[in-house]
Each structure stands twice: as C-alpha cells, then as structure tokens.
Amino acid sequence: MFASFKKKYFLSDKGIAGAKRGIFWTTLTNLVVMAGMGFLFLTMAGFIDRLTTGADLPSVLPIAGGLVVFLVLLFASNWQQYYYCYCIFYEECGNQRIDIAERLRKLPLSFFGRRDLADLTETIMGDVQAMEHAYSHVLSELWGAVIASAVVFVGSLFFCWQLAVAAFWSVPVAFAILYLTRGPMTPVFDRIRAEKVRVTEAIQETLDCVREVRATNQEAHYLAGLNAVIDREEREVTRGELVNGLLVNSAFAILRLGIATTLATGAAMVVSGQVDFMVMFAFLLMVSRIYAPFDQALMLVSELFAAESSAKRMRSIMEEPVAQGSEAFEPVGHDVVFDHVAFSYGAGDDGRAGEKVLTDVSFTAKEGEVTALVGPSGSGKSTVSRLAARFWDTTAGTVSVGGVDVASVDPEVLLRDYAIVFQDVLLFDDTVMGNIRLGRRDATDEEVLAAAHAANCDEFVSRMPQGYDTMIGENGSKLSGGERQRISIARALLKDAPIVLLDEATASLDVENETVVQEALSRLLAGKTVIVIAHRMRTVENADKIVVLRDGVVAEQGTPVELKAAGGEFAHMLSLQKEAAAWRL
C-alpha cells in the first residue's frame, strides 16, 4: 500500500515514514476518543444500575482518575498526530519545492523551450501547495479513520452483529459514491488547473508589458482581456465546486443514514427482547462519534483525487532526463571547435523532427583571439553560442573545447570555464556588490571592487546614496541600460573564465555608454577565447576572425580584411549598413 502511496502522491522515503506514523497516531487518536465513549457508557451504566437497585452510588475518585487518564492519552496522541500529520508534511513540501527547483536548474534549455513558464510556476507553487493540503488534511485523516472504524466495527460484532452492520453499512457506500466519481471529476480538475495557468500567464504578461500597454493607450483593452480570463477561471472553479459539493453532500447524507438505521434496528430489537436498552444506547453513543473522523476526510477526499494530478505533474519534472556528463574536464588549451554541427529545436520531442536551425557548421574559435559571429536574423548565431556552452546538445556533429567534447562534460563543470555577457542583463533585487559577486561567490570585497573598477562601475556607483551597498531594485530597475551592462561585465571579470561569450553586449547602448562598455570589455577579453555575436558590423571590425552564418551553414569565414576583399556576404552586409547609416544622416 505504501509503495503505491509513494508513487501516487510523490512522497519521499521520509514522507512515507511520516505518513505511516501519521496514520498510526490518527488511528490511535480515534480509538482513544472511542475509548472515551466506552468509558462514558460504563460510567452511565454503573450509575443507572446503582439507581435502579437502590445501591450506593459509585465513588467519584475512580471516575475522576479515569477521566484524567483519558485526557492525558488524548493530549499525547493528538500531539503526536499533529506533528506527523502537519509538521512532517510541511517540511516534506518545502523539500519538494527545493528538489523541483534543483531539477529545473539541471535540465537542458530544450525542456524550457517546450514548457510554459506559467505552467512551471503553477507546478512549483500551486501543485506543491495542493499536495501539502492533501498530505496534512486528508491522507492520514482518511486512512486513520478507516482503520480505526474497522477496528471498532470488528469489536462491535461481538456485542451485536445486527447493530454493527446497521451502524457501519453507510461508510463503504458513501466512499464508493465518491470513488466512482473519480474518473469523471479528473477532467474537471484538469480544466480548473489549466484556467489557473491562463490567469497566471495573463497577469504575468500584463506586468511584463505594462510600459507598452501604457505607451499605446491600451489599458482598457488589456484589462478587459485580463478580466475575461479571470471570469472564465472563476466560472470553471464554481462549476467544479458545485459538482464536487453535490457529490460530497450526497455522500454525507448517506453516511448519516447509519444513525437512522442504528436507531430503527436497535428499537426493533429492544422491543422484541433481542437486546436490552443499554446495548442499544452503547451503539447510539458509538455512531454519534464514529462518523466524525470521516467528516473532513469525505469533504476533502476529492482533493486527494485532484492531488494525484498535481503529483503526476511534479513527477513528470523529476523524471525529465538531466544533461549528463563527467565531473572531469581537463582541456588542452581552450580552442572552441565546431565540427560539422547540426541542430534542430525540439528534435526528438514527441517523435517530431523539430525546427532545423543549423545544418553544417564548422569553424574554430582560437584561444587568445576574438571570433565574431555575424549574419542575418535567424541564421543561428545565438544558437551557436548556446551550443558552445552546452545550453543545448547538438543534433549532429561535435563541439569541443581544448579537444574535449562538451557533450561528455557535466554542464555545471563545463560552465566554470565560461563567462557570458548577454544583451539582456539579469540582475537581482540586491546591492551592486551582491550582484557583481554572483560572478564568484567566494570573492573578497577587494576582488569585487577591483572587478567593478575595471568595468567602469565607479562612475555611476559614486552617485548612489550607499555606493556599492545600494539596492538596485528588481532586475536593476534603478539603473540605466549601460549601468546594468557594466555590472554584467564586472561579474564576468570577477569570474575570470578562459572562454567569454558576448551576445550583442552593446547593441542597445547609446554611443557614450557603448564607448565606456567597450573599454571595460577590452579588459575582460585579453588573452581569452572570445566568441562575439553582433549585428552591427563596426563592432566586429577589430575581431581576429569573422564567421558569417546564413541559412544554418557557414557562408564564409576569415579576417575582416580578407572578407572585405572577397566581396562576399560580409562585404555585402557591411555595404548595406553603411548605406543605412548614410540614409539616417
């Protein structure tokens, strides 16, 4: 049973151990409560017997002592039940979030290309929260109630099997009704979850595009669309809760019929002399309590069914294959070699061939040189840089660094030798110092400040109220584009990796900022293997080598002087940009 639980509800070994103990203590708590009802019955029976026979009433001290024992046992069992039903599972769900985040960190970028960000966010936050509620409020409560009731049922058969059947027949019937609705309700849960993801996507898109929305005066249109998505989700949730409520209340009604059948059966047996009144009274006390553990379990059992879908989505992430590779990486130098490389986005997913981006790419980016990748949009420049860092694996051919195939190296080990400066800089809501230190976490303050100085950060940091200890806002919202880019370069300088990838690092900067950033880059690139992606030809005229990509192949490669003289693709692109610059003037 527990092996099935582990897979069905995505539990760890520690979670399974906690579930076992939670079920045990829930069962024991229910039995202690039922024992309290038995103690109450025996006490009342003793008083009634003494009153009817005229004997002296029993002493209060034994009753008080029994009551104290009952309360101590009830407190101890409830304490243990709370710990194993709640505290353990809160920790379990916290670990699940961390495990999923760690798995996502190790997955190749191809996974994120086919999964929606809002869907992943909903899995980490919404699905894990759903599992936490199911673990703590349903799993142990349900099985603890079932086991305790089974024990009481077996015990009650020895007193009067007719009344036992009359009291317990409704329990399996009520659960059977809910279990039979499990299949039809699964699509309902999936639709509700899909609508929640759409709401998350719509809100995220609205926040991301707030500047564009305001600039184009589209607030009313965007809000109308957002309201429509929220209304659709609200309707789906209401419809689902209505159907679920009808089913659960039907089960409640059937469950409570057991009280009526116990009363009717008991009255008939008392009248016929088959049992005395006190036996009937004992069963009435029992049924007044025996259904209580099922109240919450019945109400939330459909949530347990929904949790199976959540667990399935969480499990699908954990079962995604991570990029494997050796922990050993000992290249001879740091030449980056592309040897007949082909690549398709989505290749292998669902049996599809995928979108072909590179067909046959071969070139060498030598250590100590700057190799520039140029070409029209969609020619595969960014893809080449990502294959070099093993963000994706090639479909065919090999990418090697110092003679070592990057596909054979663990990505995290490989990336220790890479410093990457993207056009779109990602910063955290931290200090300037904290954002630069991401380049190397164990760097001293002096090393961080030295990297910042080399990246020309002093100029703008000196104007900040707390200098390098100033918080820069979410994604560096308090900084300009040039300032954010200089922090990114300072990170790369601090890392001091032998291979540097520059993806349009100065494309969005004005002339003044570009000059400052280029000066910082010159310090970063000295003696490194550098691969630069650029659209503006003047930014690559000083490169040692230019590789021109077109339609997924290398159209030509060589020095800037050689390619200008050849009059090919590079010369044509250079001519077009000069004409465009002259037209703007």
Image (tube, rainbow, N blue to C red):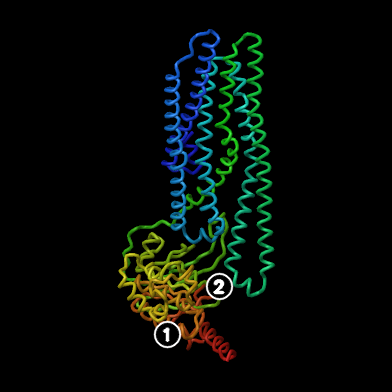
**What residue type is disc 1 on?**
Asn
Of the 4 image quadrants, the one containing the C terminus is: bottom right
Looking at marks 1 and 2 on the same chain, the residue that comes earlier in the sequence is marked by 2
Q: Residues within 10 Å of mark 1 (few under 14, many from 20)?
A: some
Snapshot quadrant of residue 368: bottom left
Q: Is residue 372 left or right of residue 448?
A: right
Say if 202 sits above or below 477 in the image: above
Q: Quadrant of residue 87?
A: top left
The answer to whether any part of residue 119 appears in the image is: yes
Q: Is residue 43 above or below residue 192?
A: above
Q: Is residue 336 visible?
A: no
Q: Secondary structure at mark 1?
A: loop
Residue at image position (47%, 71%) is: 476
The CA distance from mark 1 to mark 2 is 24 Å
Tell me if mark 2 has few (under 14), some (14-19) or many (20+) residues whose alpha carbon lies within 10 angstroms of its own.
few
Q: Nearer the viewer, residue 369 or 147?
A: 147
Element under disc 2: loop
141 vs 283: above or below: below
Q: Which residue type carries mark 2?
A: Gly
- The residue carrying mark 2 is 378
| Residue that numbered label 1 is attached to | 542
Horizontal placement of 471 versus 582: left or right?
left
- Percent coordinates x, y for residue 223 in the rendering: 66, 64
Task: Please give the label number shown on residue 572.
Answer: none
Q: Position of residue 382 (x, y in %)?
A: 49, 71
Instruction: Compare residues 457 and 48 and report the one nearer the observer.
Output: 48
Q: Residue at x 53, y 82 (%)?
A: 569
Q: Is residue 314 above or below residue 491?
A: above
Q: Nearer the viewer, residue 44 or 121?
A: 44
Q: Position of residue 337 (x, y in %)?
A: 40, 70
Q: Position of residue 579 (x, y in %)?
A: 57, 89
Give the camera-side residue of 4 and 185.
Answer: 185
